[in-house]
Amino acid sequence: MIKSFKLDLPSSDQIEVISSETDLLDKNSRLDEFYTQYKIAFPEITSERKDDLLRRLNADAIPNNYIVLYTRDGAVIGGLIMECYPCGYALLTYVFVLKEFDGQLIGTRLIDYLKRYIDTAINRSGRLDKRKIVILVFEAKIDAVYNNVHYSSIFEFYFRQNKLECQLINLYYIEPMSGSDDYLLGVIPTASSGNIRETLAISSYHTFLKELYYSADPENASRYLAAVKNRIDDRVENIPIVEFPKLRSPVLKIPKVSVALHIIEEDPDDISLLKENYYCKIFNSYEKDLFSQRYVQRSPYFSKHIDSQQVTIEFDGIVHFTSEGREETFIFVDEQGRVLSEEARQKNARVFINHTYFESEKKLIWTFVFHPESYFNEFEVIQLEKYFTGSQENVGVDANRNLDLTIKFLYQGRKYYDALSLANAILADLRSKSKTAGRADRSQGKLGAILAGAVQLDSSEIGFSRDPKHRVRLVERERHADSSSPQDDQWRFIYQYYNSDESTRKNDQGVDKLNELYDNNSYFEYALNSFCGIALGIFDFERMSFEEVGDTLVPLASTDTYFLILNKSSISCFCHENKLYANSIKYGIGINPYIIIPNAVLAYNSFWIDHGEKYLVEENPPELTGWRRLWILNRFFDKRNKVIFGHQLRHEVAEISKALHAELLNVFQYETEISIYNAGMEKRGINEKRTELVRHKNKKEDVLKEMEMRRTNSLGILSIILSVISLTQIYQFAAEARKAWILGFDPPESLRKGLENDPRIYIPSLSISIIFFFVFAYLIYRFYNAAEKVKSRSRDSRVG
């Protein structure tokens, strides 16, 4: 019986499954047609006869075959064979589509149909004659190994470009028909076998290979199994199933693009290392134009163009990242699917060096702008962006300021492995040439972290290395059959669309027009998706839909020729025939100054807020009970730093106050720059961090007040104790003096004894003692109450 399931197919198309000899009663002629096309598609397979296919339709056969046919108007135009083994493995073999029907998603529909068939007709049917399928695998021939990562263009052809989720069993495998070990097994997850498998039992893998080899090539089976066993560690019980690497062939050629890095120099030793004053004829007019009236005469910072240098950037040829919980690997290839050579991955670029000096705190924000001499592609731009954004893919700069990628920079015959090392080397050379360079340590460099960045590209000269509808190995997609490269009026429509407000877009049906352009033109689909990847700093942008593009490309500011996107520590500016951008490159800035100036201010504020956050340690004096509240002195010790607690706390308060006061307020007068400042302060969390700093500062100050009160109380009590001791000594001296004075009259012996034993002589002393006791008790009572009030205020402060 032929199984047929409802699938979204053209009306003339049908998919059928032949799973038993019974199914052949009225379909034998169609199987003949399948076998004829099968032999044409795989002429190298000489040992497989039609009788073998028929024999394996028996449920008891090893393997048991399923034949899937794709027909159009009754004629077979594609198909596949699935071999099922007793251990629960199913091997997908011999997928083919007639050449004239390539690019029409026929292979995708075949595999999608097969997955549904496994879940319904096999695993959930309840039939005892059907072997349950635990895992669906396929053979992928490995074209090469790059950086210890296997990749297969055949795999890419059948699966990745058609957006089918697949994984890889990274274990040694021998293909039994040829005896070649240039293969690995891929995994196609199904609903019933688990959409995402994380591990595989090696014992089940060995069982499958035993059944496969003895059924396919009994003579060499034992040799194959021994070879596999020698390559697999017996001590390992389970191995992870990993994502198969994807091949990515860059599409865009972007000659007008700049990537800027903002880097802090905390302690510049020579502010005037290249100029005697802060005036810069290039930046001065831009800055003065941006300032509001209050800051025109007294500028809070000064920007200056320093120099430009040529470098060669060697981009990474393979990137590993995590996207929405999936571990992904991209290998960059050319249009023919060949891995990009080291030479092909090298691009000459110009580095424009500028800095912004914040005079009040003597800090420098350096801006290094990378601009290609020929062009960057979309993935190269994103690789540079990883220094300051795109951390959602778990790729970026770590705590030690190292980039996860292996981008290399070649500068004056030397190779540097990160942008900071390159920047330090360039500054060292510039300082060594400066007339003011008088110390040897000038060449060491003192640059700190990369705080933020910016990207600007002009779409007017974007080129396409190929039609995006043709993927690697020219796999054509069904959509975009008539797409052509973008025209100038189409580019302008996009910028006009993003310059209109939301209501205007809907009323003028702008969304529908853009959606139609997106759906019907593969160039614009890819370009807009690439814009999203650049705005977010992510590699995995091709999966995005039109709705996701709309959620991502939300302009912060726009005109009919540009729009700005702010994302975390990045500002992206997409423009079209923008004269200001062209002039910024011509005069040496490298990027629109109206972008990097406010972004440098945001980077400066971010630095100081991060500086203050270092001192957000929760510190409270120890809780004291009973009489200890009266006698404690100002000797609280911090066990970590071995310093007096009070001194450390005062230092923390001072540093937090310094950070809060160093933060630069909004100094701009134009709406665009004000919007960049306000949005940056909010989206980068600077405002929230500032509120937290103020709260902690107040709390630490309360603790200091409490400590000061305790210290005052302790010193007061100590003064009372010393006073008691002093008065006791005075009283004793007075009593002895009085007694000596009385006895100094030399009275008769009988009167002397009477005076010594007379209790009235102690009445004055006793009176003084009683008075002093009550005074002392009253003072203790007052100090005790004061200590209780301090404790209550401290408790309320901690709760608040």
Image: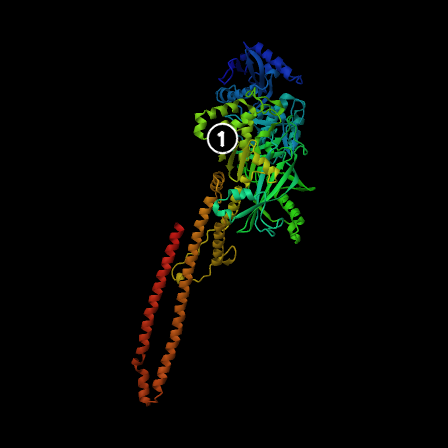
Q: For this rendering, which residue is in front, 426 or 18?
A: 426
Element at badge 1?
helix
Residue 483 drawn above or below residue 409: above
Report whether residue 163 is seen.
no
Residue 241's x, y, as percent?
A: 57, 31
Residue 304 drawn above or below residue 53: below
Q: For this rendering, which residue is in front, 208 or 595?
A: 595
Q: Pointer 1: what residue?
A: 498
Report whether residue 274 is seen.
yes
Residue 388's x, y, as percent?
A: 56, 40
In the picture, residue 340 is in which quadrant?
top right
Q: For this rendering, which residue is in front, 75 or 314?
A: 314
Residue 52's x, y, as percent?
A: 62, 15
Tag 1: residue type?
Tyr
Q: For this rendering, which residue is in front, 652 or 111?
A: 652
x 50%, y 27%: residue: 546
Q: How many badges with numbers are in the image? A: 1
Residue 11's x, y, as percent?
A: 50, 14
